[in-house]
Amino acid sequence: LGVLLTFVTGSDTVPPPLGFVPEPSVTFVHATDISDGTAQFPVANTCTNYLRVPVLPTYEQFFTHMHNSICLATTFSSA
């Protein structure tokens, strides 16, 4: 779960004593609701601790897109 926390917030630990401000949030979106070409991939905004997760036809597609996005994001966070 640490890599997911980093993907969403940009931090690998929860800051004490109050946690994140704003609190992390997640929205599940059907691919047909997004028209900008990113519908199949999760989108994180580390400034607002927000995660948009696509609802895909199969678990395999969901897993592949989440896994690949999170793995690539760790490279971005190190830049």
Image (spheres, rainbow, N blue to C red):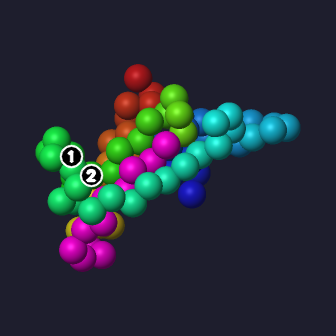
Where 16 falls versus 29 (above or below)? above
Viewer-nearest residue: 24 or 70: 24
Q: Reply above or below: 29 against 18.
A: below
The answer to whether any part of residue 26 appears in the image is yes
Res. 38 mark? 1
Q: Which residue extends farthest front?
A: 33
Q: Which residue is at a point 81% across and 38% down the rendered structure image?
A: 18
Q: Quadrant of residue 53?
A: bottom left
- Identity of the amino acid at label 1? Thr
Question: Based on the displayed image, in which of its 4 quarters is residue 65 positioned?
Answer: bottom left
Which residue is at the far top? 79
The verdict on residue 27 being magenta is no
Q: Is residue 3 left or right of residue 58?
A: right
Task: Mark 1: give few (<14), some (14-19) or many (20+) Cα within 10 Å.
Answer: few
Task: Work out which residue is located at the far right of the displayed protein and give it.
Answer: 17
Q: Position of residue 5 (x, y in %)?
A: 56, 47
**Circles 1 and 2: CB atoms closer than 8 Å:** yes
Residue appearing at x 57%, y 57% in the figure: 1
Spatial distance from mark 1 to mark 2, Cα to Cα? 6 Å
